[in-house]
Image: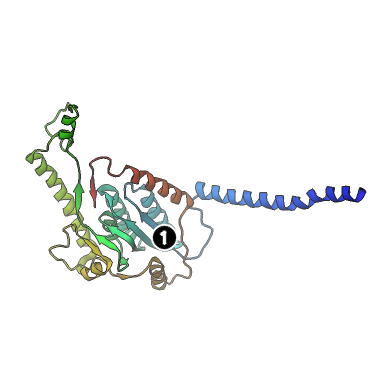
Amino acid sequence: MADESIIQAERPAKRRPLRTIFWVLAAGFGLMFLLNVLFPDLDLSTEDRIALIRVEGVIMDSQTTVGELKRFSENPSVKAIVLRIDSPGGGVVPSQEIHDAVKRVRTKNNKTVIASMGSVAASGGYYIAAATDRIVANPGTLTGSIGVIMETANVEGLLQKIGIEGVVIKSGKFKDVGSPLRKMSEEERGLLQAVMDDVHKQFIEVVRKGRGKRLKETPELFSGLMWTGDQAVQLGLADGFGSVEYVAREVIKAEDIKDFTVKQSLADRLARQFGADVAESMAGAFARLRLR
């Protein structure tokens, strides 16, 4: 009996080192997470690297991507930036803001920026890609769609059937232009079409300036048509084929980089995922002007 009591007393003592190791590891991971959230720019490495920025889903906000571009452009250890674009497009303004941020990285900070197209890099996604030094697609990538669209609905007839009358109080003749409560007049349609044409003109100018002599213009190029990656290369909308890993290897060779590290903060990844989910859930709720 004495021997058994001794054995029972020793068992908990054997588990203590395991508990200590567990709590040390948990505290370590917690500290790493906290540092990543509070100090996303913290970088103790002195090796050259490439920054990878993902532009995914519907482009509804530019803040995260513009912030990443600015931070990486000011980091001397980052020698080049790869933009992984997998987006069908989105808002005009956020696409323009990201496009302008890419241009600043190239001109002000003199850093190479290469676009790597995923499954879809169309409309606003291509608007961003046009600002980069080089565009690499896959043969099956869907890209192009160089056009602008605004959608609304006329529910006047439906409301009449169910006995509901839409009431609008406004100051200004065109304040309710595009209202779903009534039919759009030809004058209003003409005004909105002029807005669409002006934004489309801006889009075309961006593509022409970005692609330069590489662009092979055809009558359908700026008609809003979607192109495959193979067609995009033939039209000069893209420069070649390859995966994001291929792009990274090519940049490493060109910039004489010794190491390739995906440099992206955990806080940015979480913020981007949350923002993408919210944006996609709200997409299509209201009439909006967007690149698609």
Q: Which residue is mark 1?
A: 52
Q: Give left or right: position of 31 versus 273.
A: right
- Residue situated in front as seen by the camera: 218 or 32: 218
Residue 95 position, x and y percent, is 28, 51
Q: Which residue shows up at 20% across the image and 49% down it?
A: 149
- Residue situated in front as seen by the camera: 281 or 56: 281
Residue 66 position, x and y percent, is 36, 51
- Look at the numbered disc 1 and give the secondary structure of its residue: strand
- Crowding around mark 1 (Cα neighbors within 10 Å: few <14, some 14 to 19, many 20+) is many
Residue 33 position, x and y percent, is 54, 49
Question: Taking the image as drawn, is residue 125 in sight?
Answer: yes
Residue 163 position, x and y percent, is 18, 26
- Residue situated in front as seen by the camera: 260 or 19: 19
Going by the picture, which residue comes out furthest to the left? 186
Q: Give left or right: position of 64 versus 30.
A: left
Q: Which residue shows up at 35% across the image and 70% down it?
A: 242
Q: Amino acid at mark 1?
A: Leu
Question: Taking the image as drawn, is residue 175 in sight?
Answer: no
Number of marks? 1
Q: Quadrant of residue 145?
A: bottom left
